[in-house]
Amino acid sequence: MNEAVPRPGRLSTPVTAEYWRAAAEGRLLLRTCRTCGHRQLYPRSMCVRCWSEDLGWHEAAGAGTVWAFTVIEVPGHPAWRSMTPYAVVIVELDECPRLLSGLLEQRAYDVRIGQRVRAVTEANGDPTGPIPYFVPAES
């Protein structure tokens, strides 16, 4: 079986559409509650802190710190087999929310807790378009 396995794509809904539109433009958006000021990812239709439905968007600077990570050696889907090993990181953005993402431009085993990173948006093989990834801040 030499056929390439297609990668599963991201899911866009009416709640997440603006987030994905911004990602396609190279921007990272956070949902911001106009009632309590809480910023959250991923986009939801209500604030996870106060349950308000009065939400807006805030463009994040995209800088953050690796809060946790794991190295994937056996992928959960055959389409990612050629990428292994790769790092999946939880990044705490300077604007506070934490985001689960991939780390590009660095060997998976060189990732460190506390490492500074910055957001980039790349398709990286995703059939539905760019998604947020992170790269080391110095690259």
Image (cartoon, rainbow, N blue to C red):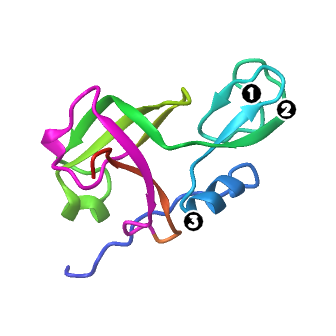
> In the figure, is residue 23 to the left or right of 88?
right
Above or below 16: residue 1:
below
Q: Say which amino acid is labelled 1.
A: Cys
Disc 2 crowd rating (10 Å Cα; few below 14, some 14-19, many 20+) is some
Q: Position of residue 3 (x, y in %)?
A: 26, 81
Q: Look at the image and give the residue range highlighted in magenta.
A: 102-126
Residue on which the image places disc 2? 53
| Label 3 – label 2 distance at C-alpha | 25 Å
Q: Residue at x 29, y 54 (%)?
A: 104
Element type at mark 3? helix
Q: Say which amino acid is labelled 3.
A: Ala
Disc number lying in front (3 or 2):
3
Q: Position of residue 77 (x, y in %)?
A: 32, 56
Q: Position of residue 62 (x, y in %)?
A: 49, 43
Disc 3 crowd rating (10 Å Cα; few below 14, some 14-19, many 20+) is some
Q: Position of residue 120 (x, y in %)?
A: 43, 55
Residue on which the image places disc 3? 24
Please tell me in which quadrant of the rendered image residue 108 appears: top left
Residue on which the image places disc 1? 47
Please tell me in which quadrant of the rendered image residue 80 appears: bottom left
Q: Residue at x 74, y 24 (%)?
A: 37
Element type at mark 2? loop
Magenta span contains residue 113: yes
